[in-house]
Structure formats: structure tokens, C-alpha cells
Amino acid sequence: MGQQHPTASRAPVIVSRGLRKHFRSGTSFVDLLRGRLFGKRVDALCGVDLEVRQGEIVGLMGENGAGKSTLLRLVAGLLVPDTGELNVLGLDAKRTGPDFRRRVCFVNCDERSFSWRLTGRQNLVFFAALYRLRSAAIQGRVERALSMTDLEHEADRPVREYSTGMRQRLALARGLLGDPEIFLFDEPTRGVDPAAAARLRCFIRQDVVGTTHTALVATHSFSDVGDLCHRVVVLRQGLVFSQGPAARAAEMMGVERGTT
Amino acid sequence: MILGVARAFFRRGLQEALSYRVAFGLRLIAMAFSLASFFFLARFINMGHSPLLARYGGDYLSFGLVGMVLLNLQHTAVSAYPQSIRVAQVAGTLEAMLATPTPSWMVLVCSPLYRFISAFLWAAIYLVAGSLFFGVRLEQANLSALALAVPLTVVAFASLGFFGAALTMLLRRTDPISPALGGLSALLGGVFYPTSVLPGWLQEVGRALPITNALEMIRRAVFAHATLGELARPLGGLALFCAVSVPTGLLLFAWTLRRTRRDGSLTHF
């Protein structure tokens, strides 16, 4: 990919204005005795303005701690912003409900995010129930997700026997259970060897996101951005540092590196 | 909808338990050892013919077995929520579950379902095995009194679980209250001896614990065929405890959940 996507005329589906989020580090018992009720303040996002249009695939890049994962979790409704505006699919992301999470899918690519003693199929059946699918629909949806991720022949093996790449695909299969409008990927090819990562990107581009879904992809990989995304947004210290076509990702990150 | 989610959590817990096939057999063996120990301890204690036991049917094995079973149930109820949350935090499944359309509170409430149900099944297995192989007398039980006492006990114990869950989310530590509560219950709750052997003021302190009233009700209903009227005092005590602890526990749980979502600490470990 890498070329400008013809989405300019489409409506924005993710809009953030002045988005801020801070965290407090944990306090030890000794801190409490010293009268410190809260830990050190860490500003994760310091006023992010961002607009993503329907059908766009936008890469989020930046150094560790730049705010990529926090931004994804705010858009997913897993976190609540301190201040600022965050509108996703016309809904206020501060007041998310089941309907919001059905339309917005946070694809947790952490390979630990499954019950390792259960099989891939058992894990997906469990998550299908949490996606509030009717009992009659669960089996069909699970089979479809397994087939799309090319895991149907491995579905009855325990997840602990899967390779990292297979677990990433299982995470994608989980994301496909809900049929969302927006996908949020957090480092989808982390820990996967280059050949498997290329296949995974191809699969995400063609079968998961397609041409109608919108996606935000937080990644450190220029290959992810180059192969998947139409546009890249570089975050630095909780702010949008630069944004532009995916083809310029390396240049934009290079500029960032040169200044730090 | 909650039934579908509850069923999914129960099935997952069962599948995980079945993946540890040896554990079930080992637990049965442990149960046999534990029952046999109680049997011989009871034989020794019964030789003294303690008048304090007459109120509960006169047999120490029956008395001690119910005490142990209820102490285990309380431990499960109090620790199941914190352990489920903690395991999901460490295993990395919590965030994946919270990202689904199922409400957060439902995920957290249903997570320990298998532990709860299996704890009750094990309690029943203990009592039935005690009755079949060691002569624990269950046939005199007043079922109508038990029909009120057991659900009230479950609600009281579960409400303690909400406090445990809230503290786990706040402190990011596993099961912060269960060890202390277990020790206090064993000391003051009448688990291994009647509370009447305690000094008067300690008996009063013990009455504030839900297990004290629960044990009094269940033992007297099962072994002395006590009627609801005769159980009015412990019943009232437990009902009062539930009336205070259920709303307080739920409010604390809901407040902690909102707070962790705001500060992003629910999935931290």
C-alpha cells in the first residue's frame, strides 16, 4: 500500500480534540506511611488531535511511552480520558457501552491473552459468548473465524502448543467474532518472524480489514506501516509530532530520531 | 444474557479443571485423609462427653465436619473474586475480556463461578462421604430451616467476596483479606469448638462474623432439628450482616471498578 487512500470525501469516524490522559504510578506501603497517597504523575497523552476517516488504515508510530497504546485503549473505551473530546462512530468514547464495544474491536495481540490449557476452538467459543452471540450462531462464527485465520486444522490443540504466529492469528480470529466497524491493532506482528509477519499483514489487509473497515495500527514496524497503512501518525511525548503518507514513515521517524 | 455469559465462564472453568486430570483424584485422597483424621479426633473428644456438644447433637465428628466445610466455603467465597481477577490480570486475559461487549461488572462477577459451584459440590461430597463412611448423621435435618439458612450464608459469604475483589483492584494484590478473615473465623467463629468456651466478650465479637451465625444455624438445623423460631437469633444476625454488607460491598466494588477504568490500573499487575 503506502499510497494516498481515496477516503478524503468520507466522514470521519474517529475524532479527537485536545485528548489528555495521565497515569499515576503505584504507591508502596512506605509511601502511604509518608503521606504520599498517589504515585508519580506520568502524562501519557498531552492534547492529541486526530481524525480518521471511514475506510482509512492509520499507523500509529513513536518511541516506547509515546502514547500509542494509551490512544488505542482510549478509542477502544478501555480507558477514560482526563479531558478533551473523543468521538468514535458518532459516540462519546467516555460513555461506552456494549453496543460501542460491538462496533469497535480492540485486537489484543498479547499472546498471553488466552487460556493456554484450552484449545484454540474452546477459547474462541468462550469469547464468542462474551461477544454476546446467540448460542446457535456461536459455532458458525467460530468456524468462520478459524477458517479465515487458517487455523481450522490446529483448532483442537491446546493454545500452549501454538507458535507465537499462531497465537497472533488466534487473536485476530477473536477480533473477527464480533464483526466490528473499526479494528484497533496493538503491535499485530510483535514477536513474529519476518516471513510469518508478512503473511499476517497480507491476511490483515485482505481478509480482516478489507476495503470498508477502518483501522488504527500501533506498531514499531515500518513493514507493518508500509504494507498495511494509508497514512501514518507519529506520536512523541504524548503529542502528534507529525503525520503523512505511510511511504514517508521512515523519514518522519528519522526526523524524530534526529531531534532526540 | 447474563445466563449465557455465566455458562461460558462455568464451562471454561470446567474445561480448565478437566485439563488437570490428576488433581481431582488427589483431592479425593486428601478428602479421605481429612475425614479419617476428623473421625479419630472425634473418637477421642467424644470420650469426654462434652455437654457443650449436646446442643449440636452430641457428636464431635458432625460438629467439626460442618465447621471445616463452612470455613472452606467462606475461604472460597472470599478469595474466589480476588483470585479470578488476579489470575486474569497476570494471564493477560482480563483486558481481552473487558474489550468485548459484555459489561465489565458481569465479567468480574461471573469470573469465579466455577470456583463457587465446585466449592459447593465439594462441600456436599464431604458431607455425603462423612455420612456414608464415618457415620455423620444427616437424616434429622430440618430442611425448611436449611432452605433459608444456606442461601443466606451464601449471600453473606459472597458479599465478603466483593470487598476482597475491590481491595484486589485497589491494592493490586491477591486476596488481601482472606487469610486474616480465615484466622479470625477459626478463632472466634466456632469452627472447631463451640463459641461458648470463649470468654464472654470474645463471644460477642465473634457474633459479628457471618460464619458464627451460619454455623450455629446449620449445625442446629442439621443435627438438632431446630425450627426457624429456635434459630431466630442467628438468622437475624446473619440477615442484618447481609443487609449491611451486600450494598456496601457492591458500592465499593462499583466505585473501585470506575476508579480503575479511569486510572487504567485494572489490567496492571
Image (tube, coloured by chain):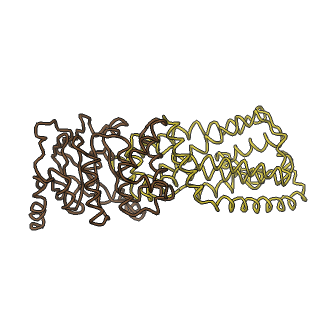
Chain colours: A brown, B yellow
Say if residue A245 shows up in the picture: yes
- Locate residue A96 relative to residue A123 in the image: left or right: left
Coordinates of residue B255 in the picture (x, y in percent): 42, 43
Q: How many numbered circles does the render carry?
A: 0
Q: Is residue B79 left or right of residue A84?
A: right
Instruction: Please name the residue shown 10% across and 48% down the image.
Output: A4
Q: Is residue B201 visible?
A: no
Q: Which residue is at the front of the view, A17 or B214?
A: A17
Of residues B207 and A123, the one nearer the viewer is: A123
Quadrant containing the C terminus of chain B in the rendered view? bottom left
How far from the left and from the top, in percent, is residue B189? 69, 51
Left or right: residue B185 versus residue A84 is right
Residue B42: x, y in percent?
A: 84, 58
Q: Residue, x 47% and y 55% (percent of image)? A: A115
Residue lying furthest front in this view?
A153
Question: Residue B160, how many percent across, how many down?
Answer: 57, 46
Q: Nearer the viewer, residue A62 or A133?
A: A133
Q: Is residue B101 above or below residue A148?
A: above
B226 w.r.t. B209: above or below: above
